Image: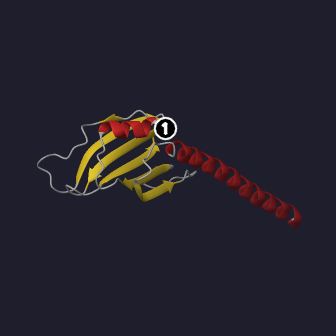
Amino acid sequence: MKKILGAILIGIVVLAVAASIIVRTFEDRITEELVAQVSRLAIPADWKVLDDIVRREQFLCVSTNPCPSISRRWEAQADSVVTAKDLEQIAAAADVTLTVDRPCQRPANNFGRAILCTGLGVADGYDYQLSLSSAAPGEPLQVSLYVSPVTIP
């Protein structure tokens, strides 16, 4: 009887390990596909990467951040001008059509941190958000990207 219980226990352990390996393989593939899609964005080579956070796909995603998701941030050259058209072209390289909410210009009465414009788009089941911000007039512009699974209202 002990041999049968031992064999059953070993079988359960082997099955659990195999299942976790299979699930992890699928999770990694989903994450890699998202990273590959986002990597197609046409980010200018002279922009400096400030942040690059990839939250991988997980069978149980227990967090306020959806799985998978990507958050990246760049700083444009100090003398750069980034327009709504530039954001649209960056996204178009990855087959994402952005709708930019307003011209990417600092309001005349704002002298502190400001979000100049935000572009939103959806592609392949993911929401894309590209935002242009500035810490102060004359400071380098920052471009933020956030990609997450489409949210259903």
Q: From the viewer's perspective, tell me whether residue 22 is left or right of residue 120.
A: right
Q: Nearer the viewer, residue 25 or 10?
A: 25
Instruction: Write the residue at 36% across / 50% down.
Output: 144
Residue 132 in the image: above or below residue 150: below
Between 136 and 21, the residue placed more toward the observer is: 136
In the displayed image of the protein, which residue is found farthest to the bottom?
2
Image quadrant in which the N terminus is located: bottom right
Where residue 149 appears, x then y in whole percent?
Answer: 47, 42
> Could you say where residue 124 lies in the image, as x and y percent from the top left?
51, 35
Q: Is 3 situated above or below 28?
A: below
* Relative vertical location of residue 13 with respect to residue 133 in this rendering, above or below: below
The answer to whether residue 152 shows anywhere in this view is no
Q: Quadrant of residue 14?
A: bottom right
| Count of numbered tags | 1
Q: Residue 104: tell me if it is visible.
A: yes
* SS type, badge 1: loop
Q: Nearer the viewer, residue 47 or 61?
A: 47
Q: Can you name the residue that lies furthest to the front here?
A: 79
Q: Is residue 56 left or right of residue 128?
A: right
Q: Amino acid at mark 1?
A: Ala
- Left/right placement of residue 44 relative to residue 140 reads right
What residue did someone put label 1 on? 94
Please report the residue visible at 40 percent of the width from the left and 36 percent of the height from the top. Answer: 89
Residue shown at 47% from the left, 35% from the top: 123
Q: Outermost residue toward the left? A: 109
Q: Position of residue 25 (x, y in %)?
A: 67, 50
* Relative image position of residue 114 (x, y in whole percent): 22, 51
Quadrant position of residue 135 = bottom left
